[in-house]
Image (tube, rainbow, N blue to C red):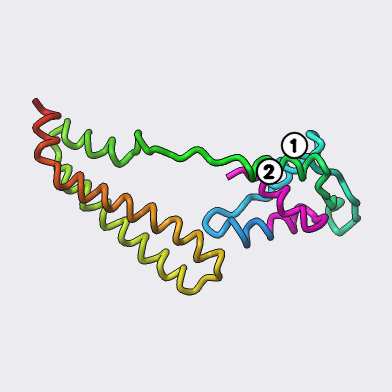
Amino acid sequence: MSIGHTLLGLLESGPRHGYDLKRAFDEKFGHDRPLHYGQVYSTMSRLLKNGLVEVDGIEAGDGPERKRYAITDAGITDVERWLATPEKPEPYLQSTLYTKVVLALLTHRDAADVLDTQRAEHLRSMRILTDRKRSGDLADQLICDHALFHLEADLRWLELATARLDKLKAAMTA
């Protein structure tokens, strides 16, 4: 995820302080991985330097001064370009799970145990996501569906790998 583009998009609704941007980001996108304040301020500094945001006001407070940021026309254009650019699909041709299965076979360990353990972890994650989906709003349901579909694809791969283990072991150790 591009944090900079996401913060720019959040600024399109109006100027905000860094604290407000962090809170909005965490509420909409950071459920599992909230932003650190340092990320927000370093990103805003970079966006300011690149002319994609401007300081809309500075307020004195109990602590340091609070800058209010606003998106510039160049920032809006940058968000529009980012939204229109498709993400490269991830082919997952070098997954850690695949590496573990192959290494288990190469080192004469039980790859079926690796696959069984992973299957159990995937099912556990799917239960958590399904519960979250039931109680979430429409946006949360959408991201949970995305994750669940990926986990389902992984489960199909786990089943296929399990069915092919004997042939794969013979090919690897020959």
49 or 79: nearer the viewer:
79
Residue ranking furthest to the top = 174
Was residue 12 drawn as part of the magenta stretch in this picture? yes
- Quarter of the image for the N terminus: give it: top right
Please give the name of the residue rendered at 11% of the width and 28% of the height, measured from the top-left corner. Answer: 173
- Crowding near the residue tagged with mark 1, few <14, some 14–19, many ≥20 C-alpha atoms within 10 Å: few
Label 1: which secondary element:
helix
Q: Which mark is residue 46?
A: 1
Q: Which mark is residue 139?
A: none
Asked if the residue at tag 2 contacts the one at tag 1, i.e. Cβ–Cβ closer than 8 Å, the answer is: yes
For mark 2, give the secondary structure: helix
- Magenta residues span 1-23
Dot 2 corresponds to which residue?
Answer: 4
- Using the image, determine if residue 95 lies above or below residue 146: above
Front label number (1 vs 2): 2
Which kind of residue does numbered mark 1 sit on? Arg
Q: x and y percent of residue 118 in the render? A: 27, 51
Position of residue 118 in the picture relative to residue 110 (left or right): right
Q: What's the magenta bit mostly, secondary-structure-wise?
A: helix
Q: Residue at x 90, y 55 (%)?
A: 59
